[in-house]
Image (tube, rainbow, N blue to C red):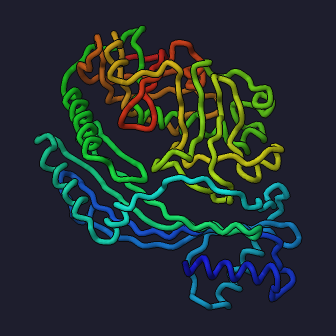
Amino acid sequence: MKLVAQLEDLLYQSQHTPNKEELRLSGWRILVHESEAVSLGIKDNSSGGVYTPPSYRQSENGEVFLVWADGKCSQAMVQLGFQDDREYWQQELEQWRQASYEDPDAAHIPAPESLPLVAVEDRAIQKIIAGEDQILFDQVKQWLTDKPSQAKMQGSIQTAWGYRHVRTSTGLAVTYQQSQFVTWFSFDSLVGGGFAKRRLSRPEEQEKLWARTLNLYEAMHMVAPPVGAKTQVILAPSMTEDMLGQFILPNFAGDRVSEGQGAFSKESFIENKLVFHTNFSLCIDPLRPLELGSYLVTPEGVPSDRTVLVHEGKLQTPFLRVKDSVRWGAKPTAIPQGTAGLYLTHKAEVPWVEALQGVEDGVLILSVLGLHAQEAVSGSYSLSAPHSLRIIKGKIVGKTDVKLTGNFLADLAAATTKTAQSELDTHPYLMIMTGVQTL
């Protein structure tokens, strides 16, 4: 906690007894991460080589947000400085002052509120970081033993444990522990599987993930008939996540909505405009135990809470950081950590195994090319999916290459769009009727 202590002392002194009057602060906020991480990987069927050596990393870094006495603001990333070197920190403070800017809406530090109880740490991960890491090497060994003989495998396991500190001039002082466990593997860069939570994966989850990925890989080596005009497109959970990240997250950011740069206007939220089909709802939920997108408090000191963005197709609110909430005239909301913690639900959702059996003519999209080049506000897409899997009469029958054309916002508004629950993924399979043709 050296960095936290150094920053607290520096900013407290600058608020109450500054060396120079122009360096006086009226408010401040500190976010500091302390973390230890252990990782290892596989590259081209080899573990522990020059490209994927087992590694241990330790870091302590953070960020500060400052409100000066004249109302200007500064923000900066910080690293651990020389302990008790007041000259070093005084120079940092002067540099932050030189980089100050005017932003009246941002010059607000929230008062402390009670925090929810959210499980965000798994003690088993702490033991791995402390040295009981054989489980990681055993997992990599098992991957290499069980992989298809002809496949070229890539993979990685990352575990992390640490502390998150949030301090504000209004009296918030929060420190809590959090963990992370992320694994992924792929065969010939065609198909892969992954797991990402704040807890270790369970043996049965590993087995199911491996079996699913192996089945998809085997199907990649069979030739399937081309798609037709009525072929149903099914986005795999990872693709659903990517589409949400490209087309949904930007359009629900409070700053973009307020500035008229999103797909939905501020008036549309105030009027609770119907934009998706009534079967769909969308929320940010950082309160689910041990999920990667869960947390106790935002970097700005706002307690985590469930925030409904869309309810039964109708807009409710964008997600609002402190600055956005001042402009919006509402309280700050939960903030998504990427697409982690973002949940899309459908009233008629069924398990994927059941949904698959009902697909007469479909194509499963595992990945696409060029997604990040698509324009987020319009929602329109034109994407190549060179490694997709054909589904006929409820069975995955082989590989096909397709091109998709459509509009993701329209997909979520269509009555024909449905979801299927994946027991291994946070996000669902998304079943849509959109433009699809064989490449």
Q: Residue at x 29, y 47 (%)?
A: 202
Quadrant in which residue 67 is drawn:
bottom right
- List x then y, in percent, for residue 214: 21, 35
Who's the residue at 67% across and 84% down the image? 89
Quadrant containing the C terminus in the rendered view:
top left
Report the residue at 61% width, 18% height from top.
277
Q: Is residue 351 left or right of residue 151?
A: right
Up the image or down, 1 lies above or below 412; here it is below
Between 255 and 423, the one lying in front of the other is: 423
- Residue 324, horizontal then vertical, whole percent: 76, 48
In the picture, the quarter occupied by the N terminus is bottom right
In the displayed structure, would residue 410 be above or below residue 327?
above
Query: Which residue is rendered at x = 77% and y = 61% of the image?
Result: 111
Q: Is residue 231 left or right of residue 280?
A: left
Tell whether 266 sits left or right of 309.
right
Residue 393, quarter of the rendered image: top left
Image position, residue 94 (x, y; %): 74, 81
Question: How many callouts does the rendering have?
Answer: 0
* Visible residue check, residue 97: yes
Q: Is residue 64 above or below residue 86?
A: above
Of 278 and 39, which appears nearest the observer? 278
* Residue 368 visible within the image: no
